[in-house]
Image (cartoon, rainbow, N blue to C red):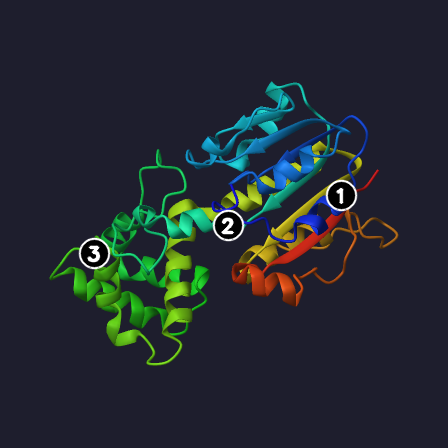
Amino acid sequence: MDSYHIPVMASQCIDALNIQEGGIYVDATFGGGGHSKIILENKKVQKLFGIDQDHDAIKNKWDDDRLIIINHNYRYMKQFLKYHKALPIDGILADLGISSYQINEGSKGFSYRFDERLDMRMDQDDEIDAVHVLNEYSEIELTRVFNTYGELSKSHHLARAIVQFRKRKAIVKVQDLLDSIKSETPKSGDYAFYSKVFQAIRIEVNNEIRNLELFLNQCKDVLKPDGRLVIMSYHSLEDRCVKNFINTGNTEGSLNKDAFGNLIRPFNPLNKKPIVPNDTEVKENPRSRSAKLRIAIRTK
């Protein structure tokens, strides 16, 4: 389990849930089950729903009558909780980061370190993979992907290089992609550049931002008053959505006020600034370095 994904800021996340006697909770990104295992160590928990669309993640389930695994995208959280007659619930935890297992499993094509097929699907039942995006998207569409999801400067140059390369050879494996963008790769800081390129493609393949928006909008419907929403993000696009939603009740950040000018929102933030891992954790688990934890309480 630990080799699958080391849970980031585990104690902070569990403390933030403020677990209640007989409480029902959701781990919306079950992954390796690291956070879920710690949640269930608390005997107060009546039931925990672990949600994950990755079929490999479900293999990490262990025997505990209180744990119910839902092998679907968390955008369907409300639907499944309603099916299980579990509404309303006491707390939701979501760790939005890609797992160590997914990065290290070369066959999934998430990392530039392995020359494997460019898949990048978190749900293997999805039809569109990274190969489709890189070979079928137009130059304009690719520019949008790299600009919006990678926040890369000169995204149009990057898109053009890919389009020109694929005229000679299909981009199927990781090395094909690296070769196609060689002319646009900086001589220094290439690893950071590759990370942004792969992040952008992965987000597009898995429709991550839209799914996050749909998930967040359900949280206000499924949580009890005083219920906790605990979300950890790893890049600015995700964190912006989470911050806006907690502060305003929508992912766009639009303010909704009553006739007296009071802000109307379904959550009150517990921390104005995100909680970040300490130096010791970053040293032990380098992938935690970009994590930002935000906590909110459902208003009454």
Estimate the spatial distance between the alpha carbons at disc 3 and disc 1, rounded to whole Å. 45 Å
Question: Which of label 3 and label 1 is nearer to you?
Answer: 3
Quadrant including the C terminus: top right
Residue 60 visible to the viewer:
yes
Q: Which mark is residue 266?
A: 1
The answer to whether the residue labelled 1 contacts the one labelled 2, judged by CB atoms less than 8 Å apart, is: no
Please name the amino acid that badge 1 sits on. Pro
Q: Which residue is mark 3?
A: 171
Q: Is residue 251 visible?
A: no
Give how far across and how far down residue 86 sits, in percent. 68, 22
Dot 3 or dot 1: first in sequence order is 3
Q: Position of residue 96 (x, y in %)?
A: 55, 49
In the image, is residue 50 above or below residue 129? Answer: above
Q: Is residue 288 left or right of residue 258?
A: left
- The type of residue carrying mark 3 is Ile
Choose the circle earlier in sequence order: 2 or 3.
3
Residue located beneath label 2 in the image: 209
Mark 3 Cα shell of 10 Å, populated few (<14), some (14-19), many (≥20): many
Disc marking residue 50: none
**What percent of the width, then of the height, locates residue 195?**
41, 64
C-beta proximity under 8 Å, tags 2 and 3: no
Query: Residue 167, located in which quarter of the rendered image?
Result: bottom left
Label 2 residue SS: helix
Relative image position of residue 81 (x, y in whole percent): 62, 25
Above-or-below relation of 90 to 266: above
Q: Nearer the viewer, residue 277 or 241?
A: 277
